[in-house]
Amino acid sequence: MSVISNHMPTAELQALDAAHHMHPFTAGDELAAKGVRVITRGKGVWLNDTEGNKIIDAMAGLWCVNIGYGRPELAAAAARQMEELSYYNTFFQTTHVPAIALAAKLAELAPGDLNHVFFAGSGSEANDTNIRLVRRYWAIKGMPNKRTIIGRINGYHGSTMGGASLGGMSGMHEHGGMIDAIAHIGQPHWYAEGGDIRPEEFGLMRARELEEKILELGVANVAAFIGEPVQGAGGVIVPPSTYWPEIQRICDHYGILLIADEVITGFGRTGNWFGCQTMGIKPHIMTVAKGLSSGYQPIGGSIVCDEIAHTVGAAGDFNHGYTYSGHPVAAAVALENLRILQEEKIVDYVRDVANPYFAAKWQALSDHPLVGEAKLVGLMGSIALTPNKATRAKFASPAGTVGYICRERCFANNLIMRHVGDRMIISPALVITPNEIDILIERAWISLDECYTRLNAEGLMVSD
Ligand SMILES: *Cc1c(COP(=O)(O)O)cnc(C)c1O
């Protein structure tokens, strides 16, 4: 096999990709026929492809490149660590300095008594850890029937069997099924599902579905509730202000463990270190990944409170772990990433500079004839596309038809925005400058205009 380089013609790379590479969440044959886009370089918020395009990445990869692409300090940290100790495990009563240092750092950054870290290779794996951990916890407490974990419809917790089961994506459940003892309640998605009810009232209603579900299943059978402080993959859905305080009250009242899946909302995304601080909640476990290493290395983990860690630790072996739990290279890179986030005061920058600057311009997008609402928390945002702003109507075309058209227009204008159904979402690198925010917004307006023109031409501006 010859060396694959960026200098091969795009068509050859595309043909090889089509022949041998299976893509996640992708219609394989359709992509093979169309030809995949080949990304070659990244710097800051910018990407290059083999066709010479310079693309502004408003998604930070997959919500993960918090400090931006191409920081040489992280490359140096990886090289140093590979030369020193390229790999060792943390199973057999051993450890190494990067895992120790990263665990201690996370305990320092995490709020309250979240002082213990179980490392994984990804967010999905960390959520699998959480399933086993909370079930083990209650079994040790003499309540082996407390096994069911309640998640939310349209929540996202990863793509392993455990992660996909905790999540509430029906399309994922259809492909491969679910594990046992998982239940789901409705999501706090006022824009799409709130009808004429006030958002605050709707937030309370959706939170109280947790109470109903606990009573229906029996409190003796419920181990935990899991939720993203702000739903990400579901469409950047910001819950009404009443939602999380009521969820907290219900978890406290019934003694149910609260798991905050911070895989997206962690490490500055919402303008605080963790989304639970922005939402004012106190979880027993936080799932982390993505921004933990800014995507420079695959690493995730569960940050666990004293009570669970001590209970599980006192009861003999916990029969769980991954070959790459606390991988030294990934841990060293994550540490360097956290150093940069902290020393360059990037979380403060999100809260005090980038969010206020971005929010005004993002909000103005709701003046566009196609946009029903524009939401931004920290640096994660969404806009709802609609044929009728006044009624928040859905399009008559199948969900996602219009979102896909809009995404294609963004792509053509060298802006990476994702669509979830007919919502457009963004989550740029946290280091995005005001000037880059201007460019992003300018390209978003152009893309929305082009999308609007096309919808009108094709008769798609029709309400459901
Ligand atoms: C991405 C994501 C995951 C899964 O993380 P992977 O690293 O892809 O396994 C879990 N939870 C949330 C909230 C995510 O956004």
Image (tube, grey):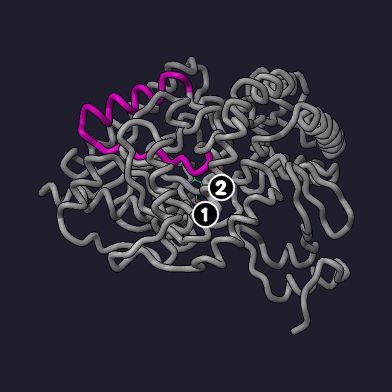
Seen in the picture, residue 116 relative to 375 is either above or below; the reply is below
Residue 250's disc number: none
For numbered disc 1, what is the local secondary structure?
helix
Q: Can residue 314 be seen in the rendering of this structure?
A: yes
Read off the magenta span. 240-264
Splitting the image into 4 quarters, where does residue 108 fall? top left
Q: Are marks 2 and 1 in contact (CB under 8 Å)?
A: yes
Q: Nearer the viewer, residue 172 or 11?
A: 11
Q: CA distance from mark 2 to mark 1?
A: 6 Å
Give the amino acid at mark 2.
Glu
According to the picture, the residue beneath numbered tag 2 turns out to be 336
Identified at 71% across, 26% down, the residue is: 371
Identified at 67% across, 30% down, the residue is: 383
Splitting the image into 4 quarters, where does residue 247 fall? top left
Q: Does the magenta portion include 261?
A: yes
Q: Quadrant of the C terminus?
A: top right
In percent of width and height, residue 445 lies at: 82, 29
Mark 2 close to ligand 1, CB under 8 Å: no
Give the amino acid at mark 1.
Ala
According to the picture, the residue beneath numbered tag 1 turns out to be 332
Q: Callout 1: 10 Å neighbours few (<14), some, many (20+)?
A: many
In percent of width and height, residue 1 lies at: 74, 84
In percent of width and height, residue 293 lies at: 55, 49
For numbered disc 2, what is the local secondary structure?
helix
Q: Can residue 425 be seen in the rendering of this structure?
A: no
Q: Nearer the viewer, residue 293 or 78?
A: 78
